[in-house]
Image (cartoon, coloured by chain):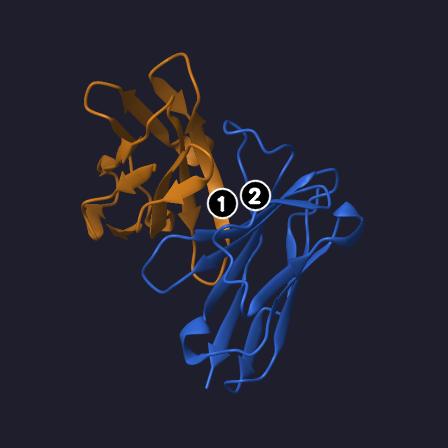
Chain colours: A orange, B blue
Amino acid sequence: AQSVAQPEDQVNVAEGNPLTVKCTYSVSGNPYLFWYVQYPNRGLQFLLKYITGDNLVKGSYGFEAEFNKSQTSFHLKKPSALVSDSALYFCAVRDNRLAFGKGNQVVVIP
Amino acid sequence: EAGVVQSPRYKIIEKKQPVAFWCNPISGHNTLYWYLQNLGQGPELLIRYENEEAVDDSQLPKDRFSAERLKGVDSTLKIQPAELGDSAVYLCASSSDGTSGTEQFFGPGTRLTVL
């Protein structure tokens, strides 16, 4: 069965600094990988996905993610974090169904 | 374009009572999902519909949970009777199709508290 690991519970970063949220995955077939963001009392919002092609995927709100097959990783990145980026971030992998990680709380400090 | 609509947003009930959640997916989306999200965890799939057919309900606790998607549009998820452990957020999502590479769009969820 497919699974995702998000090793850090919380990521703290100063506003304006680069932001990285880590994700590793396990899946038997081709990896279909997704990042979602969740703000308090709101549903998950789709950020970006990797299906095939370029390893660097660009998404919404200036976010991008790098697919690394050899390391089975799909880390989310943003060159310059904003206070408004503070939220809960979920990585997910799809095989027969979408499997989410436990999420990472991102706190951007002004 | 309107997003996925869910109601109610919050529900508080006593254990052993029934409860129902409603979802209206994005117009034209044939695939509808119900997820359960416990505090501090990612969502977990309960059931997936392709049009009106439940194509993956292996994770649905069928002794107390039921779902329907009459006419292949709106869907209702029911719990009867509710238990304390059912307290969680119930998320509905939809997608244009059910293939693995298609992103899902989520509603705001229904936060259920069972007392």
Q: Which mark is residue B105?
A: 2
How would you rate the neighbour count of disc 1 (Cα within 10 Å): few for under 14, some for 14-19, many for 20 or more? some
SS at circle 2 = strand
Which one is in front in this view, the residue at disc 2 or the one at disc 1? 2
**In the rendering, at what x and y percent does residue A50 appear?**
41, 24
Asked where in the image residue A81 lies, by quadrant, the reply is: top left
- Which residue corresponds to the image point at 56% horizontal and 43% vertical from the top-left? B105
Q: Which residue of the protein is positioned furthest toward the right in this rendering? A: B71
Q: Is residue B90 above or below residue B64?
A: above
- Pick whichever, A95 or A11, lies toward us: A95
Residue A62, picture quadrant: top left
Please give the chain letter of the residue carrying mark 1: A
Mark 2 neighbour density, 10 Å: few (under 14) some (14–19) many (20 or more) = many
Relative to B34, is A62 on the left or the right? left
- Which residue is under mark 1? A45
Horizontal side, residue B82 vs residue B75: left or right? left
User: Does residue B25 appear anywhere in the picture?
Assistant: yes
> Which of the labelled discs sits on residue B4, or is there none?
none
Q: Looking at the picture, how far across and down is residue B34, in whole percent?
A: 56, 53
Q: Is residue A78 visible from the viewing direction of this image?
A: no
The answer to whether residue B42 is above or below residue B20 is above
- Measuring from the top left, give residue B63's x and y in whole percent: 54, 68
Q: Residue at x 50, y 29 (%)?
A: B100
Distance from label 2 to label 1 (Cα)?
7 Å
* Residue located 26% across and 36% down the image: A23
